[in-house]
Image: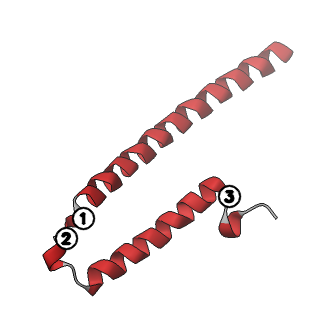
Amino acid sequence: MRADRVKRAAANQQRSLEAFLAAKAAFEAQVAELQAMTADHFGAGPEAVMWGHAASLVDWTRRLREVTDACHRRGELAPG
């Protein structure tokens, strides 16, 4: 019985690792997209930037901060 439990736990851990690595690859792909977007000034040339561009970037930055705060357990997600 114990051997079966150990085998199931090892298989479960392997599946967990595979799911984690797939999620990590998707995350890294999104980070790469963000890096490309910022290198391109989010598709807005300096001479064409308007308040809407700035507002969008402020909103995106706020949302990205939520993700980084969650990862680093800062802000509202800091340990109490």
Secondary element type, mark 2: loop
Q: CA distance from mark 1 to mark 2?
A: 6 Å
Residue 41, labelled with which disc?
Answer: 1
Does residue 10 show up? yes
Residue type at the position of mark 3: Arg
Residue type at the position of mark 2: Ala
Residues marked 1 and 2 touching at CB (< 8 Å):
yes
Of the 4 image quadrants, the one containing the C terminus is bottom right
How crowded pointer 1 is (Cα within 10 Å; few <14, some 14-19, many 20+) is rated as: few
Residue 44, labelled with which disc?
Answer: 2
* Residue found at x 20% / y 66%: 43
Disc nearer the start of the sequence (3/2): 2
Reading the image, the residue beneath label 3 is 73
Secondary element type, mark 3: loop
Eyeballing the image, is 26 above or below 66? above
* Residue found at x 55% / y 37%: 20
Residue type at the position of mark 1: His
At which x and y percent is residue 56? 34, 77
Between label 1 and label 3, give the one nearer the viewer: 1
